[in-house]
Image (cartoon, grey):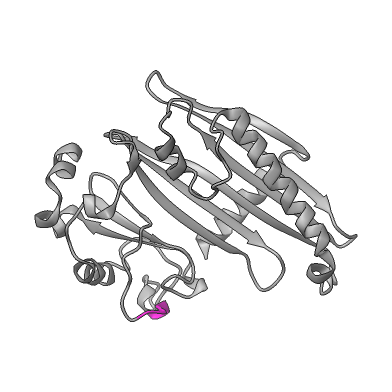
Amino acid sequence: MKNLIVMVTVAFLAISCKKNETILVKENKTPKFEIDSVVVNDSVKITDSLTVKYFDKMLVFPDIKEKPLLDSIYFFSSKLQDFTKSGIKTYADVQKSNFFTSFQKEKEDWVSGVSFAQEWYQSSAMKVISNDNDFLHIQYSGGSYMGGAHDNYYYSERVFDLKNNKRLLLSEITSADDKTLSDLLMKNINTINGGAMDQDGAIDNKEMLLVDKIPVTENFYFDQKNLYFHYSPYEITAFAAGDITIPISWKEIETTLQPDFKKRMKL
């Protein structure tokens, strides 16, 4: 639940900074790798009681030229074909316009039950988490509130192999089968975070599980210590547990690590 509160707070802070404009932001620049971003931020007052806000942050990678890699980075839309800053800006503006147009057409269905002042929103963002050993980790996140008991939000983790210009597959990291990984995920489920606590205040995410076996997700990333699997609300646990990140240490799967990956990561 803490993760939900933090994300919603950040989303609203980001959304409320400026209205009715598209902002081009120079995010980071190094001699080897440049990252820019396009931010679209807008809001519309639907009725006296309802305001709808829209926020979208898309990263721009001027140094990446390979289309298959760019297609994988922007996997969420086949309509995006111009990966320049201006091309991404145009795409982001169209998405925003389509959102509000669609909302206005169906607003009677949406707002019929709104009896007090509310702010609804939809947000999405891309964020570079790391770029080490030519492995680029991008986190995609989003959230929305369109009435109801609570917000909804999600995370999608992707690691890209900049050396080979493609998305990195789990099979390129480890040869461990799904059962082995699933057993380790169950064993380590309370290692990092979660909103489920027992009566003594200790993390107890198992109490919130919606599955008998934890599936191996493609939402993975890694650092020098662990391989991490990230689950959004409702994927494996009840919403109250928040999003769950489960680590598997390199030592636990040491004998299954792929030689090329192990060498590249200096494990």
Nearest to the observer: residue 30 or residue 199:
30
**Magenta segment, prevailing SS (helix, strand or loop):** loop
Residue pictured at 39% horizontal, 80% vertical: 207
Residue 227 is left or right of residue 27, and the answer is: left
Q: Is residue 14 magenta?
A: no
| Residue at the image position 77 percent from the left and 40 percent from the top | 19
The image position of residue 60, as x and y in percent, is 52, 33
Quarter of the image for residue 142 reads bottom right
Magenta part of the chain? 207-211
Quadrant in the picture for residue 115: bottom right
The residue depicted at 64 percent of the width and 29 percent of the height is 24
Residue 267, visible in the rendered structure: no
Q: Is residue 24 left or right of residue 232?
A: right
**Observer-nearest of 229 and 81:** 81
**Image vertical order of residue 109 relative to residue 154, above or below:** below
x%, y% of residue 11? Answer: 62, 50
Compared across the picture, whether 37 is left or right of 52 comes to: left
Taking the spot 67% from the left edge, 35% from the top edge, the residue there is 90
Asked if residue 137 lies left or right of residue 97, the reply is left
Does residue 67 appear in the picture of this structure? yes
Q: Give the image location of residue 236, x and y in percent.
A: 41, 72
Query: In which quarter of the view is residue 56 placed?
Result: top right
Q: Nearer the viewer, residue 234 or 104?
A: 104
* Image vertical order of residue 129 relative to residue 28, above or below: below
**Residue sticking out furthest to the left:** 255
